[in-house]
Image (spheres, grey):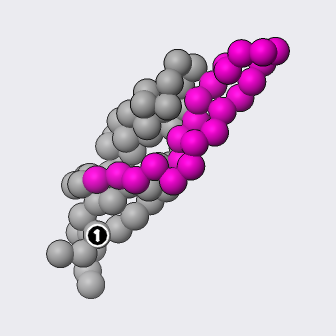
């Protein structure tokens, strides 16, 4: 089996977990055979004294379907 890897950034105003889920959900709309993911980086935005956005850099691994 051969797999490919792509990196996407998900964001959400409430949590890192939701940011990761948003990244996977969006990637699944254009990629097939998603198998697993790895969170590479976590970051966020601050407005005033509050966290306003959570972001996650997510590496998504999926089956390679092209010619070898």
Position of 51 compared to 23: left or right?
right
As drawn, which residue projects farthest toward the right? 48
Q: Main secondary structure of the magenta part?
A: strand
Q: Could one spot residue 45 in this view of the protein?
A: yes
x and y, in percent, of residue 41 in the image: 56, 49
Name the quarter where the N terminus is drawn.
bottom left
Name the residue located 67 percent from the left edge and 21 percent from the top edge: 51
Q: Quadrant of residue 48?
A: top right
Magenta segment: does it hold 48?
yes
Q: How many marks?
A: 1
Q: Quadrant of residue 27?
A: top left
Position of 22 compared to 43: left or right?
left
Magenta segment: does it hold 5?
no
x and y, in percent, of residue 35 in the image: 24, 54
Residue identifier under label 1: 3
Name the foreground residue: 63 vs 44: 44
Name the residue located 51 percent from the left edge and 53 percent from the top edge: 40
Q: Which residues are magenta?
A: 36-57
Local secondary structure at mark 1: strand
Name the quarter where the C terminus is drawn.
bottom left
Name the residue located 43 percent from the left edge and 37 percent from the top edge: 20
Mark 1: few, some, or many residues within 10 Å (few <14, many ≥20)? few
Above or below: residue 32 compared with residue 26: below
Above or below: residue 39 compared with residue 52: below
Name the foreground residue: 3 vs 16: 16
Name the foreground residue: 61 vs 65: 61
Position of 39 compared to 41: left or right?
left
Q: Could one spot residue 22 in this view of the protein?
A: no
């Amino acid at each position: 089996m051969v797999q490919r890897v792509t990196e996407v950034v998900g964001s959400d105003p409430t949590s890192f977990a939701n940011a990761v889920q948003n990244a996977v959900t969006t990637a699944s709309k254009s990629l097939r055979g998603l198998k697993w993911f790895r969170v590479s980086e976590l970051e966020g935005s601050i407005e005033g004294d509050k966290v306003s956005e959570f972001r996650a850099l997510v590496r998504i691994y999926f089956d390679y379907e092209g010619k070898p």
